[in-house]
Amino acid sequence: MKEANEEEFRLRRYLLGELGEGEQESVEERFITDRDFKELALVVEDELVEAYLSGELSEAEEASFVRHFLSTPEQRRRVRLAGKLRKYMAAGAPAHPTEPGGEISTPGFRKSEFGRGLPWRKPSVLVPASLALLLAAVLGLNWLAGTRQRGKELADFRREMERLNQQPASDGPSWVVLSPLDMRGGREANVLQHPASGTVVQLWLMLVKDEYPSYQVVFQKGGDTEQLSVGGLHAETTSRGRAIPFRIPAELLPPADHILKLNGIGEGGRIEEVDEYVFRVTR
């Protein structure tokens, strides 16, 4: 027990940056060779974070903690997460009366030896487990918020493209002509200069054969898995032949390779693949 306490004290000093260079190297070597020692270090680290958040460190220890332990963004983020966990646990604590000594008394539960000494009740186990749960919750919430925000942005772009493509088309020099992939899978050089922000790119999707009453275009931005589709499009006659007019906001066209898939809408709303157009936006 004495040896364990000495190791914990040494690890605490290491985490606070209070060991000499030789002792630091010795501790770090044991991290690599001694798995139990490394696990003990993680426990001491969690207890040190908890002591900092609860104000139990001395002024000198707190200064060392801030100067040494919080010297990296990763460690600062970890302490912020632990602080959020403390607030969460304090706000969500059950409203039951406490018994003498400050222990929570839960109605219907008779205090006994059951549970005493169980490892999950020890701070050295509870704190890292709670931090892991908090981290998972925060990452989950961030992912969910990001997904919702991304979904909203895609819905806004889809509505904007539908609005733009309801406008009548008129052939002119502002339109860019795109040729489909040929039967061998080769690609003509469809290259566009990066459009200015706030502008609209107007494209003619040239048809090999016009045989559907209406069409659907599916747009996939380079590097993305999400697709935006616009239906109810109709072929028109241009100086080069029959083509589908299609407009895209410049914000959807960063420098990259982009794909437009053209589908024909047959009888009964049946969707059939027609052609694919690949074009590159350059800087």
Image: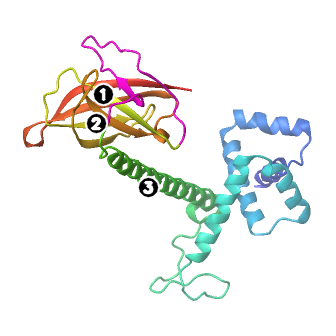
Q: Quadrant of the N terminus?
A: bottom right
Compared with 174, 118 (above or below) is below
Compared with 196, 1 (above or below) is below
Q: Secondary structure at mark 3?
A: helix
Pointer 1 or 2: first along the chain: 1
- For marks 1 and 2, give the CA distance: 10 Å
What amino acid type is highlighted by mark number 1?
Leu
- The residue at which mark 1 appears reads as 205
Q: Secondary structure at mark 1?
A: strand
**150 vs 78, nearest the viewer:** 150
User: In the visual, does 271 lie left or right of 44?
Assistant: left
Q: Secondary structure at mark 2?
A: strand
The answer to whether any part of residue 145 appears in the image is: yes
- For marks 3 and 2, give the CA distance: 24 Å
10 Å neighbourhood of mark 1: few (<14), some, or many (≥20)? Answer: many
Q: Disc number at residue 217?
A: 2
Q: Residue 167, how many percent across, how many down?
A: 31, 45
Region in magenta: 170-197
User: In the visual, does 65 lie left or right of 103?
Assistant: right
Q: Quadrant of residue 184?
A: top left
What amino acid type is highlighted by mark number 3?
Arg
What amino acid type is highlighted by mark number 2?
Val
Label 1 close to label 2 by CB (< 8 Å) = yes
Q: Disc number at residue 148?
A: 3
Q: Is residue 196 magenta?
A: yes
Foreground tag (1 vs 2): 1
Q: Residue 130, how many percent across, how many down?
A: 58, 60
